Amino acid sequence: MVDEDKSKKVNVKDWIVLSTTMIGVLLTILALIWGFKPTNGIITVTFLLMMAFILFINAVTANSRAHFESKFKEISEKKIKRFINFAEYTFGLGFTFVIIGFAILGYKYLLDLTNIV
């Protein structure tokens, strides 16, 4: 009964799917922006998106570890919550890098399309 309650509390499968989807989206966007480069800012945006890629991988790993550890009775709930907190922070930071990268990228493409240099 206690094992069932613990596994119900640690429902991270949706976060694993979301983080994995973000990894695929990032790699697709990186391939597309390098095919149609703006005149400036491509290196900065690539750096931010690659940092986000690493953080999303950390989020998947931490959520998977929390899901795996929650199946064992001898693992404390505090340790599992540490994995979940780490995953939340890395996902949040990675998503912040994505938003910053897209803002820079959108601005640079806008400058290119309006011919303002």
Image (tube, rainbow, N blue to C red):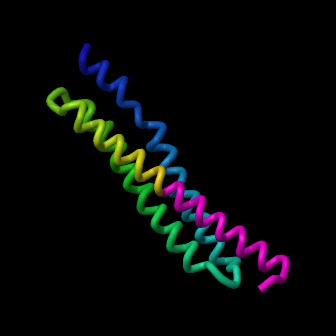
- Left or right: where does residue 28 sit relative to residue 94? right
Confirm whether the magenta stretch covers residue 43. Answer: no
The span shown in magenta is 94-117
Above or below 22: residue 104: below
Confirm whether the magenta stretch covers residue 101. Answer: yes
Judged from this view, the residue extending furthest toward the right is 114
In the rendered view of the protein, which quadrant contains the C terminus?
bottom right
Instruction: Where is residue 96? Give x, y as percent.
Output: 53, 57
Q: Please report the residue visible at 44 percent of the width from the left and 44 percent of the height from the top.
A: 16
Instruction: Where is residue 25? Give x, y as percent.
Output: 58, 58
Instruction: Where is residue 63? Give x, y as percent.
Output: 36, 43
Above or below 25: residue 80: above
- Left or right: where does residue 94 sit relative to residue 77? right
Where is residue 71, by image quadrant?
top left
Name the main secondary structure of what is drawn in magenta: helix
Q: Please report the residue visible at 62 percent of the width from the left and 79 percent of the height from the top.
A: 41
